[in-house]
Amino acid sequence: MCDWAKNFTFVPSNLHFMETIKQLQQDFADFLAKTNFNGQPKELYEPIAYTILQSGKRLRPMLCLLANEMFGGDEQQALWPALALETFHNFTLIHDDIMDKAPMRRGMPTVYQKWNADIAILSGDAMLAKAFQFALKPRKGAELAQQLGKVAIEICEGQQMDLNFETLGDVTIDEYLEMIRLKTAVLLATALQMGATVGDATTTDIQHLYDFGINMGMSFQLQDDILDLYSDVEVFGKRHGGDIAENKKTYLYLKALELASEKDRKRLAHLFTLRIDHDEEEKIEEVQAIYDRLHVKEAVEQVIAEYDQKALAALKAVSLPEEKKTHLRNYAELLSGRKK
């Protein structure tokens, strides 16, 4: 059990937390429903509405709203960066799915699959522009847009690193961790940063929350690596073993190379040269058997626990009474036990 979950149980004192989460989710859903994503030509706008109105986790908007709430900020102001983050995140998913040739997302056909790659690219571009429009709406809009611009560039850097890893012969664990920091963790951290900014937090506290988000994001992505292989596809919403099928050098793969015998290292390296037209299920099963034999899943879970500890330390450093941090801490604890 990870550090978040050790101290978390659903007792009556947490009822207020659950009510708060439900209320914030509803407030964001109402705000999203009032946003007009329609327009002409319909081929450009229909994929935007199709993507953003699907029932996702809304993780980034929730982090933004919870950070704002911590500092007693105006929720109506915070809803704009929350919407910007959700729009931006969905833009990245549309383009990711094109690059990954992913047929499904959240249990539904991806935009490039339902329409085509050209439409997916254009719709994604429009979503990116809309995200900046939303970020500029509230007071401190210029600062929020700067934060969004910074993370947009970082995510592109992380995505390019991820693409590079598919063809590089040698990728180190440190290089992989830097890639997931850029590709995943920085957006969670920026969600907290934007929420705290609009909530008038101090520069020091904003940095502590950002650090909390980075470590939580690292934990979140490493969980994602595990879930890709060790979860129910109907729950996770993606195909089983997709990372292995696409030769993605995840932490599981790199840790296996570190722990494996020479024979297993050579076999893994060979399996990760096979392209998508190979017998996919056979390849996934063989790689998973090697992982299981080396107890790779357990090794990754230990690293996740270490990031959880760092995240808790960063949250503790925020100069607010502990009771003000309860909702965000509890939300992070919920994420630590996710199955999708």
Image: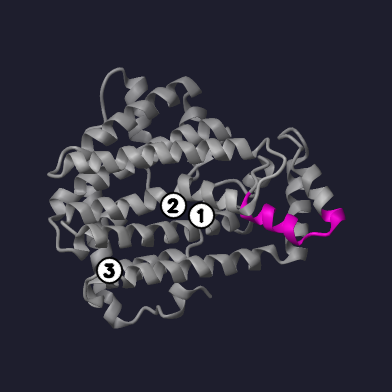
What residue sits 57% from the left and 40% below the top?
162
The correct choice, above or below, for 315 with respect to 279 in the image is: below
Tell me which residue sits at (55%, 39%) in the image.
Answer: 161
Q: Is residue 37 left or right of residue 283?
A: left
Measure the C-alpha gap from mark 2 to mark 1.
8 Å
Which amino acid is tagged 2? Ala
State the SS at label 2: helix
Residue ID at (52%, 69%): 306
Stretch in magenta: 250-264
Of the residues under marks 1 and 3, which one precedes in the sequence? Answer: 1
The residue depicted at 26 percent of the width and 28 percent of the height is 38
Q: Of the two numbered discs 3 and 2 on the same chain, state the one appearing first in sequence.
A: 2
* Numbered tag placed on residue 318 in the rendering: 3
Q: Are marks 2 and 1 in contact (CB under 8 Å)?
A: yes
The disc labelled 3 sits on which kind of residue?
Val
Q: Is residue 265 above or below residue 53?
A: below
**205 horizontally vs 285: left or right:** left
